[in-house]
């Protein structure tokens, strides 16, 4: 069975470099259309059901604004 995950993003810490968007193999993340308090377009999770908790987005984030959780089967 494929792993399922949950991505949590602190949009106020995000500076909009989009490294995580390019790193995500299943295209869960995309740029937001709303500015954050710093005047940047942060990322947002859009296809959350596709997240496989691979951690690629977390690994490349220079601002440590992404958390990844692997979900148990009962949480899916």
Image: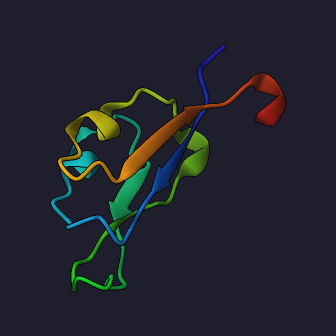
Residue at the image point whose x is 22% and y is 86% from the top: 39
In-front residue for pair 53/8: 8
Q: Is residue 40 visible?
A: yes
Residue at the image point whose x is 23% and y is 82% from the top: 38
Q: Is residue 5 above or below residue 39?
A: above
Residue at the image point whose x is 20% and y is 57% from the top: 18
Q: Is residue 69 above or below residue 1?
A: below
Q: Quadrant of residue 60?
A: top left
Q: Position of residue 25 (x, y in %)?
A: 34, 34
Q: Residue furthest top?
A: 1
Q: Quadrant of residue 75?
A: top right
Question: In the image, 4: left or right of 60?
Answer: right
Q: How many marks?
A: 0
In-front residue for pair 8/34: 8
Q: Is residue 24 visible?
A: no
Q: Is residue 18 above or below residue 69?
A: below
Question: In the image, 53: left or right of 2?
Answer: left
> How is colour applied across the structure in the image?
rainbow
Quarter of the image where the C terminus is located? top right
Quarter of the image where the N terminus is located? top right
Q: Position of residue 14 (x, y in %)?
A: 28, 64
In-front residue for pair 50/65: 65
Residue at the image point whose x is 36% and y is 73% from the top: 32
Q: Position of residue 50 (x, y in %)?
A: 55, 40
Question: In the image, 20: left or right of 49?
Answer: left
Q: Position of residue 31 (x, y in %)?
A: 31, 67
Question: In the image, 57: left or right of 2?
Answer: left
């Amino acid at each position: 069975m494929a792993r399922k995950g949950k991505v949590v993003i602190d949009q106020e810490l995000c500076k909009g470099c989009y490294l995580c968007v390019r790193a995500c193999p299943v295209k869960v993340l995309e740029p937001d259309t709303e500015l954050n308090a710093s005047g940047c377009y942060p990322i947002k999770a859009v296809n959350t059901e596709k997240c496989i908790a691979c951690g690629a987005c977390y690994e490349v984030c220079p601002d440590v604004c992404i958390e990844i959780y692997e979900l148990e089967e009962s949480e899916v």
